[in-house]
Amino acid sequence: MKKSIPFILLSLCLFISNSLLAHKETPIEFSSVSAFFRMADKIGTENTPSEKEWSELFATDGYSRCIAATFDEKEMFLRRAMELAYDPRRQNEKDSIMNIPGEEISEEWETLLLRVILANFIEIKENESDIKEMLLNLDDSRIYGDAISKLRSFLVNPVDSLIYSIPVSLVFMEPDILNLSGNMIWDCNRFLKQSSEERTDRLAREMFLSYISHFSSSEIRSPLIKVILSWQNEGIADLIDKKSLADLSVGFTHFGLPESYVSEYNRVYNITPSLIKDLEQLTISYINDEISEDEFNTDLSDFIRFGGTPTGYYISTLIREAGYEKEMISGFASPVIFMELYNRCISEEYSLSDTFMEYLKNLK
């Protein structure tokens, strides 16, 4: 049967429409949040959830990704914190945990993590109606659109086809943000407390890490290169959503960690020039056969502190303030360029030797 012109035009329009929908920005996913509230309602009425119901909660998209990428016991911490926050029969137990002094609890990471999650859940319980209202009015397409624009303006000569949205799952957990191989797990309470600019900048930061992964070699074998890449990737990415050292350590405030954590983080940032000179000396010792390869590789692990973020941010801000930001960003795939720019900016006292730089250039 011969198809009419209107029918063909309608089919074409539907095809174009479906194609556009397929390329629409990935929506922010919050099935774990909805399941959390359903479970919280049950616990709050002093009904004990079944093991099947707990399994269903932690099988939702956000929670399953989070637990699989962190540690198996994470489920236990989340479950216990929910029970303490929402079950009125456990008020005394909840109070005893929340009243442990900060410096005392910092020595017991399990109790510390439980209290951090519990404190967040208590706040979520107190603001449940506001949280639900904000989620109803969430404009995720605008968040993604703004983040893409932010990243595009940050990059030098960007490859537009490699700038794209990454999946975001909102969950209730400790007030943290995780990037799990290009999939973001974002604590919903922290997400909603952030300004639209803060959300945009953080999403652009994580999209940058996904962007540069297309230019990274999967065959990098040198542990030394891996150390410098951790500084470089985190340092450049942090220029997108951080304005000062205080912005770097703000996560400790969200976690309710003792001041000693912030002090140590700031100390690592401030000793960066000395730390890099120590790295150089270690490398020279290895080049001169004064230490074995196993000793060299083992000692290198000490140079990635706090994931490399304080050291990387020191280097990237030093380079930016010296006027070489464009060169640094355009050379994001080369740890050699990163260290050459650092060497150009640092004082002579801490400059790196030709021996070290030549060794670095020959690594893979």
Image: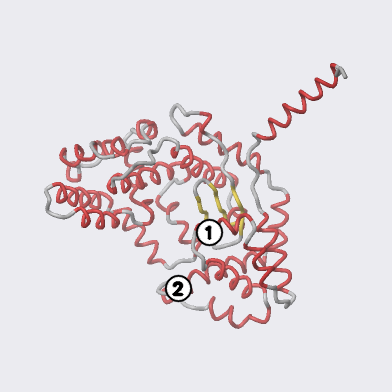
Q: Residue at x 25, y 54 (%)?
A: 297
Q: Amino acid at mark 2?
A: Gly
Q: Residue at x 52, y 43 (%)?
A: 201
Q: Amino acid at mark 1?
A: Ala
In this rendering, the label closer to the viewer, 2 or 1: 1
In the picture shown, does residue 277 fall above or below 175?
above
Disc 1 target residue: 68
In the picture shown, does residue 253 fall above or below 218?
below
Disc 2 target residue: 102
Q: CA distance from mark 2 to mark 1?
A: 29 Å
Q: Is residue 250 shown left or right of residue 12?
A: left
Q: Is residue 215 shown left or right of residue 9?
A: left
Q: Is residue 184 shown left or right of residue 102?
A: right
Q: Is residue 290 shown left or right of residue 338?
A: left
Q: Are marks 2 and 1 in contact (CB under 8 Å)?
A: no
Which of the image's four quarters has the C terminus?
top left
Q: Tell me residue 18's x, y (percent).
A: 72, 32
Q: Residues within 10 Å of mark 2 (few under 14, many from 20)?
A: some
Foreground residue among 184 and 69: 69
Mark count = 2
